[in-house]
Image (cartoon, coloured by chain):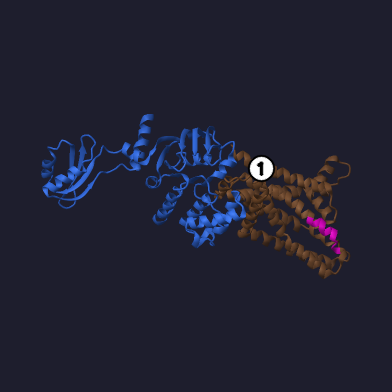
Chain colours: A brown, B blue
Amino acid sequence: MDVFLTLVRRELGAAFNSLTGYVVVAITLLLAGFGLVDIVQRLNSDRTPSPIPEIFFADGIVFWLVLILTTPVITMRTFASEKALGTYEALMTTPVGEWQVVLAKFTGSLVFYLLSWAPLIGVLIVLRQVTQQPQLLDPWAMCGVLTGIACIGSTFLSIGVFASSLTRSQIIAAMTSLLIGIGMWTLSLRFSQADTTGDRLGRLMDHLSVTHHMQDFARGVIDGRALVFHLSVTFFFLFLTQRVIEMRRWK
Amino acid sequence: MIEVRDLTKRYPGRTAVDGISFTVGRGEVVGFLGPNGAGKSTTMRILSSFIPATSGTVRIAGFDVFHQPDEVRRRIGYMPENNPLHIDMRVRDYLKFRARLKGLGIGRSRQRVDRVIEQCGLKDVEKRIIGQLSKGYRQRVGLADALVHEPDLIILDEPTIGLDPHQLRSVRALIKELGRQHTVLLSTHILTEVEMTCSRVLILNQGRILAADRVEDLESRFSQDGRVVAEIEATPEAIREAFRDLPEVAALEIQAAAGAFQRVAFTPKAGQDLRPLVFEQVRQHDWSLRELTRPRLSLEDIFIQLTQKKKGGDL
């Protein structure tokens, strides 16, 4: 546990010491700003606006842009740069376990990712103060949004960590996870908009659709199936990462 | 401390290490010497259980590197090739981080970090960011990292590569210092370095051990039959005349040197040291003498001889 926390702290330190860390924060801030403008415009034009979390996280694309653009950048560093710099060798010749390393790198990325969302949460709070309409910002919906950010984020981050373990090039790692992320998003959009009554495949795809999950979360519906889905996918990719490390080590 | 038996490492299409065996005793400083691509780094990576061997066994302090890697890693301080460091960290933070990774508690790691900072002369730079340090200081940070958990065995892969003469000197002195308390295995392709720091040398080429010996023994084994060179101020005829009847001298060659001096190379008959004899002759004839040496084969020459012999044998 001790070693695990040391590694997590190191991961966070690396994220905050690097330019990419601040680029991530800047992207998030910029997109949050666009989101704010979007919301203000809608609130001005619409007599009966939908609740803010839904505009922000379900209807709009701000959330998806942040998710798809920042997670590869956060995770590309984890293994690829250590391999490129050779510090990976120094790390793996200390008595640390492979799982410890994988989980620490994932946890570090997750914490940084959640921190980078802080400005957006701030935007929501500001809106609540300004609009003076509590029904637009239901606390349950806020909880749902936070759960959604964490859950769907974990899935994307675990894919990013896995991509990073495959290569020593950060660019390749980022491109791989970006591609998978965009693929998941577009497929999800396609199937959550499709007519899903009756067709078994359609219904199955709807259950797997991450945009559908987020729509639920933004309404304050925390669906157990969605939670299980994201936790399993996260675990699955972390498991793959551990296998890759072990395989590379004992090849 | 280290027992290596029939160690082989094959990569697809290439054998990096080809069935080498050697042992290193506790407290020895052993140099791994060989050209680039000789298999030094591969062997060291196997020893520090970073990669597995294709076949053969390695035991470190009695623990098998394949079956008990964590026990081995606890006992080894390993500095990989090119000394990779987290360049965004401060020296003290980095060493503390490494100490914690190696399983030291908070109090113990602080104590040890203080100690290695002092030992490696990092006191002045402990608050600085590693990326801003000179190469010499970075090398010391790498050494401090290797030492921080008080390992029994220190493995250094090319610890002095790319240093300027000043830094070279201080890093070598540090390694020599380490050799007093630890078992050290270091690799290099700089031959004088082995002469300066190691007690024993293993010469590696193309994945095989060509020679394993004490540094002095290697030199005497490959010495040039005790040849002595002197620069004497006299005519060549006079020199020939003076040494002609001495039974100890088998042959001598004379070359003109700068000034009125002659450079004379004496070959002894039975391998004895001719230096006192030469000096005696010079004194008797009242010549002046400005050099009297017995040129030793450097490890460089030994290495070239060994590798060439190897090539000749293969043909």
Per the image, label 1 sits on a secondary structure element best described as helix
Part of the protein shown in magenta:
A136-146
Query: Per the image, is A210 magenta?
Result: no
Query: Per the image, is A144 magenta?
Result: yes
Mark 1: amino acid: Gln
Q: Is residue B219 left or right of residue B96?
A: left
| Chain name for mark 1 | A
Asked which quadrant contains residue A93, the reply is top right
Numbered-mark total: 1
Pointer 1 residue: A242
The image position of residue B68, as x and y in percent, is: 59, 38
Q: Residue at x 44, y 36 (%)?
A: B206
Q: Is residue A161 left or right of residue A189?
A: left
Q: Quadrant of the C terminus of chain A?
A: top right
The image position of residue B2, as x and y in percent, is: 49, 38
Asked which quadrant contains residue A69, the reply is bottom right
Above/below status of B297 relative to B309: below
Q: B112 or A198, which is in the foreground?
A: B112
